Amino acid sequence: MEENVIKELDTLKGMLNNWKRGFLSWVAPDGGNDYVLQEFSEDIQMHVYPYVTRLLEAKHLSHPEATEFMDYCYSQVEDLRDQLSKVETNESKKEV
């Protein structure tokens, strides 16, 4: 993989982390936060996936590299899910 492509993917990872931090601020402590995960997943699908697809079509990424990167992206949704669960659990403990 070319160095400039690696930099592009690192930039996308940084963008995903910024989005994830932003979505954490949407958390309702009483639960019902599935929409946050859906929004994050939709943003990946709408903004990141087409970009990675173009990198693949232009042969800047191999199919395994593109798959690995998209797996990373969707693992961030699962990471956000875990973080949301912790926030909800911590808030419910405070109420008791």
Image: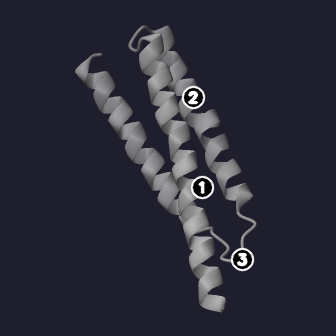
Which callout, 1 or 2, points at the residue further toward the start of the chain? 2
Amino acid at the residue labelled 1: Arg
Judged by depth in the image, the label closer to the viewer, 1 or 2, is 1
**Depth order, front residue of 32/16:** 32
Q: Residue 22, image x and y in percent?
A: 52, 61
Say above or below: 92 vs 51. below
Query: What secondary structure is found at the residue carrying circle 3?
Result: loop
- Tag 3–tag 1 contact (CB < 8 Å): no
Amino acid at the residue labelled 2: Tyr
Dot label at residue 43: none
Say above or below: 59 vs 46. above
Cα separation, mark 1 vs mark 2, equals 20 Å
Q: Residue at x 47, y 35 (%)?
A: 72
Give residue 34's quadrant in the image: bottom right
The residue carrying mark 1 is: 81
Which callout, 3 or 2, points at the residue further toward the start of the chain? 3
State which quarter of the image contains the C terminus.
bottom right
Q: Left or right: 20 with respect to 30?
A: left
- Tag 3–tag 2 contact (CB < 8 Å): no
Report crowding for label 3: few under 14, some 14 to 19, many 20 or more residues within 10 A (C-alpha): few
Q: Residue 84, image x and y in percent?
A: 59, 64
Q: Residue at x 51, y 31 (%)?
A: 71
Which callout, 3 or 1, points at the residue further toward the start of the chain? 3
The residue carrying mark 2 is: 49
Cα separation, mark 3 vs mark 2, equals 32 Å
Query: What secondary structure is found at the residue carrying circle 1?
Result: helix
The residue carrying mark 3 is: 30
Q: Residue at x 30, y 16 (%)?
A: 1
Report crowding for label 2: few under 14, some 14 to 19, many 20 or more residues within 10 A (C-alpha): some
Amino acid at the residue labelled 3: Asp
Query: What secondary structure is found at the residue carrying circle 2?
Result: helix
